[in-house]
Image: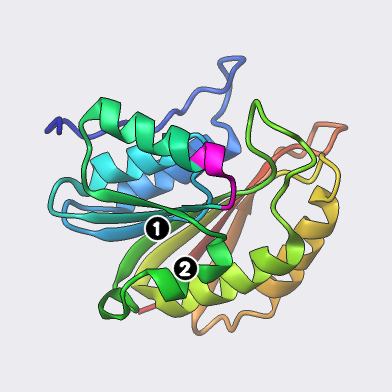
Amino acid sequence: MSESLPKANLASSTGGLPSAVGWAQLMMQDRLRPGDAVVDATAGNGHDTLFLARLVGEAGRVWAFDVQAAAVQESRRRLDEAGVHNATVIHAGHETMSTHVPVAFHGRLSGIMFNLGYLPGSDKSVITRTETTITALISAVEILAPGGLLTLAVYPGHSGGADELRAITEWASALSPSGCEVQVIRPINRSASPPECWIVWKRD
């Protein structure tokens, strides 16, 4: 595994400000340290999984989840080609993370990343579902370490995305401010429904 730390993908496709994923990576890059334990709740093609694995280094641990076999296979291939061996890719939904992450790491996870929507280059009808996303978020906050960070890239523009965003907004608004701080980064001068980056910091 390379000793150099990865850098977040800050530039958008147009060279402007970071995308929702770019902001999420930037936050993780700022907070995570070698040896940390983290979760990629939506492995997809493995980009965030690899990013996290490199951030936490060989002494760290990564658990990644995806319901699609193709995503699991692609994520494992990407990790193998990069020579990264500190990540476990699990063929299961993110709502099962508290079951698959060993109990010894509950309350010790430094970061959890969600990248919602559908798998790029695949069937767009296969999307993250509101019910399982909210279940996963509830579990994520529970097993996150004090001082840990949870990020979500949310896509309200696709079918089902607006409903998912509304549910996330209700869930986040109900979080006790004494327990968590929540911030949202979104473009405000675009007519479409642009992706948003949600950041949840679990207080000490």
Q: Provide residue 48's location: percent of width, then percent of height.
A: 43, 40
Q: Which residues are magenta?
A: 67-71
Of 178 and 56, nearer the camera is 56
**Image quadrant where residue 2 sits:** top left
Figure quadrant of the C terminus: bottom left
Question: What residue do we see at 11% from left, 33% from top?
Answer: 3
- The local secondary structure at tag 2 comes to helix
- Which of the labelled discs sits on residue 148, or is there none? none
Helix, strand or loop for the magenta stretch, by majority: helix
**Residue 74 seen anywhere in this rendered image of the structure:** yes
Mark 2: few, some, or many residues within 10 Å (few <14, many ≥20)? many
- Residue 47 vs 198, above or below: the answer is above
Instruction: Please name the residue that numbered disc 2 is placed on.
Output: 97
Tell me the quadrant of the picture where the N terminus can be found: top left
Type of colouring: rainbow
Residue type at mark 2? Met
Near-viewer residue (128 or 30): 128
Q: Is residue 21 magenta?
A: no
Say if mark 1 contacts mark 2, CB within 8 Å. Answer: yes
Q: Residue at x 70, y 40 (%)?
A: 195
Three-letter amino acid code of the residue under disc 1? Val
Farthest residue, direction top: 14
The first of marks 1 and 2 along the sequence is: 1
Q: Secondary structure at mark 1?
A: strand
Residue 51 picture location, percent across and down: 35, 38
Mark carried by residue 39: 1
